[in-house]
Amino acid sequence: MACVDQTTDKHPHFEPRVEDDALVRGRGRFVEDAPQPNQAHGVFVRSPHAHARIRSIDLETARTAPGVIAILTHKEMDAAGVGSTSVNPPLVGRGGKKLVMPFRPALARDRVRYAGEAVALLVAGTQAQAQDAAELVTVQYEELPAIADLRAAMAAAAPQLHPEAPGNVALDWPGPVPNDEATLRAIEKAFGQAAHVAKVSVRNQRLIVASMEPRGAQAHYDAAKDSYTLRCCSQGAYPQREQLIAMMGLTREKVRVITEDVGGAFGVKTLAYPEYPALMVAAKLTGRPVAWMSTRSEAFLSDQHARDTITDMELALDEKGRFLALRVRHLAAMGAYIGIPGANIQTNNFARCLPGMYAIRLIDVGVQCVFTNTVPTGPYRGAGRPEANYALERLVEEAARVTGIDPVRLRRRNLIPRKSIPYKTAVGTTYDSGDFAPILEKALALSHYAEFKKRRRESYRRGKLRGIGVSCFLEHAGALPTESAALLFPGGDRLVLGIGVQNTGQGHATVFPRLIAGRLGIPAAQIEHRHGDTNLDLKGNPSVGSRSTMTAGSALYRATDLMLEKAKPIAAGMLEAADADVAYRAGYFEVVGTDRRISLFAVAERAQASGDTLDTKATVDTPQTFPNGCHVAEVEIDPDTGITEIVAYAAVDDAGVVLDHTLAEGQLVGALAQGIGQALMENAVYDEDNGQLIAGTFMDYAMPRAMDMPPIVDAGHNVPATTNPLGVKGLGEAGTTGSLAAIMDAIANAIPDGRGVNIDMPATPAKIWRACHPEG
């Protein structure tokens, strides 16, 4: 796989990431790399059933096993005051009905609702002892009917998971801006009078996140202070603590969360899982630190899954192919409980991607969130954005077939023109920036779209089928606006840069010090990056949704301005000059028009000596941005085997101001790998009769490998965002969001007679072969 950047607006060359030296030398600090003195080990007993009543739990034999220190069930959780472990932003559905949030215990009480739900926690001196003892726990279950399929869960005769959710519906949502009667009539009229109506029904299959480092945590209880410390792999220490104190009824000063290096996250590590309060209670009861590390098989059954949606979309067009109205009905599986923040992903995150790059003034969106006897779902790269864009772009392709208009020409005809920016959408968002038409043209040129027919003929001569697919997309980034940052002066010529967003591979320790170094005019080597500790006292949100650079960067800019405002009068006093005569430049305060100056760090030392400080914190709310782009995939199919190869991939993205092109390309390639996985191979399959996860190991769950990656050419057409001082937009989701439709449209384009149009992801060789051989 080669990645060639055709971008012409390159920034100056930057040195390699500062994080990499420690990581490649094996000096990273992951969850298992910091065992505590006298540490005990925990193993969870998990339900083998998708739906069952717990009749009894026999712990006696396990208690006598070697090394066992304690065994915890729901009784210990209840005694410790642990509440529900489901936390989700409030959502209101039709008729004012709120999102149904069933109680989710840390350890199951009288019923289990998915295979893998934790029932008990064994604590022993070693991990092996805990594992052996866990196998001696006897749980008597009364198995109940289970339902794993999304549509089947809504049937009248389907088993009911929660009495407070009739029909297994957690929420019936009318969209971010519910339409009034006049708008609904206008939409009906548009469809009734349309010259053409295109319809699609597409499925985003359930996915396993499969981060390189499984989840894990260490809990410690300080009896003298009556406080807890949890060291875990997360996407933000502060939001982890906020969830934990809500679950356990504690105050902030009673819980410290620490996160160091994280071996992959992609959304799955945003939440405080039920295991974490259980470990904290165990640490208090035993008086010892308690550690747990998930096995890979355990991760398949306990990490939040992703996607599992069905989207019905229809588009009304006039006789010239102009888009008139869009109607969307979206079904989303929540799993057995509301994950964090599962319902928000499939409502607000999904709907805010509409209408993409297209001028569609009338939109009707409805979403139903549904309970099933499966692992709860949550964020995974894109988190609602790939689902929306995939359905919309497949719909545009269907509209091209229905109208007989070339797919590229149809897209050109309906793009929002630059003169209409800022553009207020029908779902309540406002695109502050963007230039969509040139992005499409640049992507077509980059992919050599005009010469595709020649390449198709060459493939045909070799007995292969060749197809090309175009995917325009627009996302929203930064849905969680609040973020904080700190600039701290520990002494000497050093500056500590503290942020709350967690580095899980994005290169924060590289980007942010260089950003502030440029702003202050000091060497980046003098700036130390800190994160992952609630003792920094920085309010904020996880590193999700391509939000980190815009939100943390804005907070750092504000902290810098506040710090310099604080430092200026101190510097003026040291220089014996009026404040108005002093300016800051390149690391120094100077008296304008003279050679008298003093360094920033000398001012910090003077402030410290006089009982003051230049230490500064800032909290900022940063509005959303709308990254966008156009990706073009080209595939070659062997009709004898059904094997699909992505032979070329072109990507043009608008990420606003790009701070580091190497990191930007890394984000594109990584996200594309995950998009390829979903499009061609990944599928978390459940047995519909009993709710068992069939694809529960890597023997059954396929993952993309290096050989599956295509040659990539990429370029930028970057229009700075107007909603933050850096001008940046999100970038981390683009490769996933743009690739699904590009790949699937290319497959549909390759297979003759429209036989590939209705293939659902993943487009496995078996599905492709059947489409190529309808007679067989």
Image: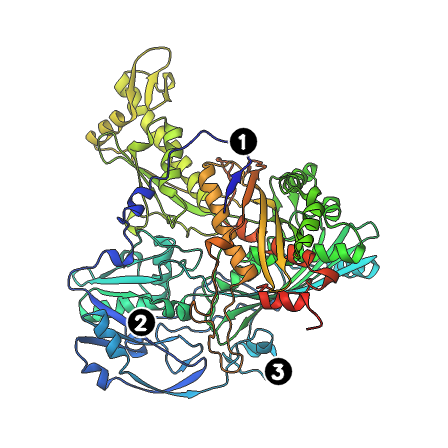
Residue where numbered disc 2 is placed: 81
User: What's under tag 1, amino acid-wise?
Assistant: Asp
Which badge, 1 or 3, comes first in the chain's sequence? 1
User: What's under tag 2, amino acid-wise?
Assistant: Gly
What is the crowding at mark 3: few (fewer than 14 residues within 10 Å), some, or many (at least 20)?
Answer: few
Q: Nearer the viewer, mark 1 or mark 2?
A: 1
What is the crowding at mark 1: few (fewer than 14 residues within 10 Å), some, or many (at least 20)?
Answer: few
User: Closer to the camera, 466 or 203?
Assistant: 466
Residue 408 in percent (x, y) is at: 72, 47
Residue where numbered disc 3 is placed: 156
What is the crowding at mark 2: few (fewer than 14 residues within 10 Å), some, or many (at least 20)?
Answer: some
Say which quadrant the C terminus sits in: bottom right
Q: Which mark is residue 637?
A: none
Q: Nearer the viewer, mark 1 or mark 3?
A: 1
Q: How far apart in space, not on screen, are marks 1 and 3 (Cα)? A: 58 Å
Where disc 3 sits, the SS reads loop
Residue closest to the far top: 594
Q: Which mark is residue 9?
A: 1
Which badge, 1 or 2, comes first in the chain's sequence? 1
Q: How far apart in space, not on screen, are marks 1 and 2 (Cα)? A: 56 Å
